[in-house]
Image (spheres, coloured by chain):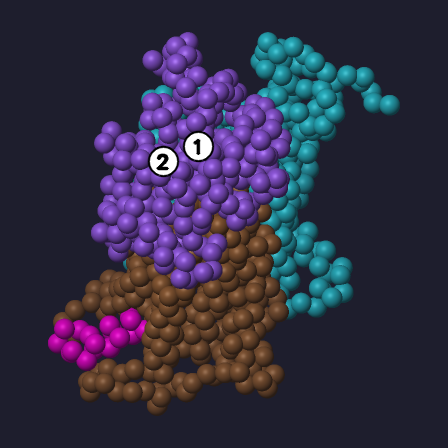
Amino acid sequence: MYDVIANPAYLVQLVLSGLSIGSVYALFAISFVIAWKSTSHLNLAAGELGSLGVFTLSSVAAAGAGAWAAVPLVLAGSAAVGAALHHGLVRHVAKKGVFPVVLLTLAVYLVANALVGLVWGTQPIAAPRLFPTGPDAQIVLLQGPPQAYLTYGDLASFAALAIVVAGLALFLRGTRFGLAYRAVAANRESAGLVGIPLARTAALGWALSALIATLSAVLLGVRNGSLDYMMMTPLLVFGLTGATVGGLESLRGAVAGGLALGVLVNLLPGLLRFVSGDMGLVIALVLVLAVLLLRPQGLFGVKRLERV
Amino acid sequence: MSAPLLRMESVNAFYGRFQALHGVSLEVGEGEAVVLLGANGAGKTTLLRTLSGLVKADGRITFDGRPILGRRPEWIVRCGVSHVPQGRGCFAELTVEENLRVGAFTRRDAAGIARDIRHWYEVFPRLGERRDQPAGQMSGGEQQMLAIARALMSRPRLLLLDEPSLGLARVITEGLFERLREINERDGTALLLVEQNAELALDLARRAYVIAAGHIEVSGSSEELRDDDAIRRAYLGH
Amino acid sequence: MRPFAVPLVVPLGSRGHRAYQAAGAVIATLFVLLAPVLLEDYRITQLGQALAYAVALLGLNLVTGISGQISLGHGAMFGIGAYTTAILVSDHGWPFAGALAVSGVVGVVFGVVIGLPALRLSGLYLAIVTITAATAFPLVVVQPFAQELGTGGASGKPVVLDWGKPSWFLLDVSPVGFRFVLVGVVCAIVFALTGMLVRGRVGRAMMAVRDNPTAAAAAGVNLAQTKVGAFAFSTMLAGIGGSLFMLMVPIVSPDSVGFPLSLLFITAMIIGGETRVAGALVGGFVMVFLPTVTSELALQVPVLADLPQPGLLATVLYGVILAICIFFLPQGVVPLVTAQRERFIRFVPRGVPAAPAPHGPELPDRTSSTQVPAPR
């Protein structure tokens, strides 16, 4: 712990990296919350749909289309798949309860994950290059040693989070359909009673969820420089944790939860000796258990949960 | 008499395998105020929910001559039916004004919507005072006013109200029913009111039905029901 | 022309019913004793794995089918049992029986720790917590502090089992064969005890909590205790299953006990269905034999034979089968088989007039709901 405190640059770096990866977690948490708000169900397949998206992007980019040009196409494709998933499959089992939907999204998870492995192989492949990576592509903030710096990957993550948050805020608070969306999240039955088309709202919610999940997968892959077919599995946990900690109905909560988780996962190994760098998932588990024990509705959630 | 605005014929409604309504027939005329009385669990709420398309049913329901049974709630609203559910069903996280705006979701005339919102702030001044507050923070009476105003934002021809007096103080309820009378008489909105509070309801409505165990047992004018001791004792508890 | 004009109607609990059950028990005993004599070690290992999985699946059946909750971390609980047994037997020289017992206890403890916060809330939170636990478990196992406890790190933990059959065991079986008999015996005991539990007051309480929590609470059932108890019982069975698995496959590694294993358990449970004994057994066999069957099938199809990763094909198939079951077979495969049996013998509760069976599956001795259970 002494190293960290004695070196402000090191502390700043840990926090910055934490916020950076936290932005990716936050984006993924948002993808859960946005689907949850429109249907009260979790889209557990979001990560693997994102994985499909980023692998498709790498193939399209490799085929000569250019990575940046392919991004909107891939995002649009994901949105379509997300909407189709809800409209075609989930909607029909949703009336049977929570469990069938969880199972169905897990089935899609299995199939999508295995498809990626079958089509692109189980060995890591190079990620599409959207911006420069590598030791020279950095902006140094504080001279160390060690230095505190920001990579293009960090900047891209912050930017993506900011754009998505701003875009969603604009949609939800500034448009008629956004108001309808919030109404569905607040009280689904009453929303139907004022004439809001519930199926279409749900399709939109799941489309956005898949799109944002793909965005987070792209960020993750490009930051790491490589893609592998299991890359989104830990993110499933981090995204769920971020969403739960923040409160499943709250977009603000998803952002806060994701960022906080990112910082914690980065900071704790640096501060505490016995926590090794890979303990991120364990930290997530402890955090989820703690939140559910102490404040089940999450930091920003509304206290509406059933209690035993 | 011209065809009634709403007609239910031999409607059976089901929750899963449980049958909640048995051969229910009922009518509401254009601009009429009708009340549905009955004890807890008799099927009053189920009947309204069936009209709104929330409950599976068979039989025949027509609104303005068009069959509406089996249609989705969002379609039925567009025909001109608006439902104030039991417990108000407000959008707790949205502000009062947003609740009203979303009530007008089926409308596209921005100017008209704005005018209607101002109108409701005049009718229910408390709503105007709290226009930017989340609906969930308001008292029961205020939420009830909001729910009614929200339901009327779509300019329905028939308003379904499920126990508007539930949980409200006597004074508030009296004020509420006054507003409902104005809405019915001045705006010509038909009302189908479900109530346990028989007195105020029979004052407001012209005709009444009594439902028990999913069957319509009695129907007649409000005077008839008010004056008939046997009916009052059997179905209204006094 | 069918052999019987009308199916044989047998009241539950009657002598005829008992005879049927006894016949089943005899067949099962013969199977457990004769299989190791007649089959080679390779097959016996597979059958033993299926039985070990079946024990774990019985727990999963209990917590989802009877208690109505979603556990997506069963693989991790299975893994904890396996690791506990491996460490105690290999590093500390414990006898297997003791290790088995401790594995069960460890399963209970983790079940309570993980279940308690989530079970006061809706079932979805248990799903989230168990997904997190399932994904975190393989990582914990490779941590330095865990390796100091003896988990063996990424390469896995082997189990040293250097005993063969005792001299009083008269059948001529290999060491593997004897271990299979042990697995079979433990399996039978577990199934019998669980069956008693479910048919008794505890089982009824669990079903009440699943079907109508408010009514159950009003009737005096402690909802939290029942839910946590059911979950802890299921994790105990998972731990026991994992321990038994070590008798058949003497090594456990982080890769084999992660989230994918939990998903496989869920899929197998759905395919097997919620009928306790039969469903768990069917599920166990599916888990062992489906990947083999899939790979062999894949080799037949020219397009698929060239795939770089044929093992993943089994996963795709799992996902598709799971989806199909959700839509068309929410009760799994077993009711289809039971329907055939019902053409010949029907079991009815006592006091019900013995009317001939209408055409089509009518299951008079089932009290659970007919849809995939929805946790409240």
Specify the amino acid type for callout 1. Answer: Ala
Residue B5 figure quarter: top right
Q: Residues within 10 Å of mark 1 (few under 14, many from 20)?
A: many
Q: Report the chain shown in cyan.
A: C
- Magenta region includes residue A7: yes
Q: Position of residue A177 (x, y in %)?
A: 45, 60
Please report the bounds of the magenta region as a residue range.
Answer: A4-20
Compare residues B75 and A148 and report the one nearer the observer: B75
Distance between the alpha carbons at the discs numbered 1 and 2: 9 Å
Is residue A249 at least partly visible in the picture? no
Instruction: Provide the residue designation for mark 1.
Output: B33
Colour assigned to chain B in the rendering is purple
Residue nearest the observer in this picture, C208 or C290? C208
**Can residue B237 be found in the magenta stretch?**
no
Q: Main secondary structure of the magenta part?
A: helix
Q: Residues within 10 Å of mark 2 (few under 14, many from 20)?
A: some
Residue hosting label 2: B181
Nearer-the-camera pick, C375 or B28 = B28
> In the image, residue C107 lies at what x, y percent?
38, 41
Q: From the image, which quarter does the N terminus of chain A lie in?
A: bottom left
- Letter of the chain that mark 2 sits on in the rendering: B
Q: Residue at x 45, y 29 (%)?
A: B34
At which x and y percent is residue A151?
33, 83
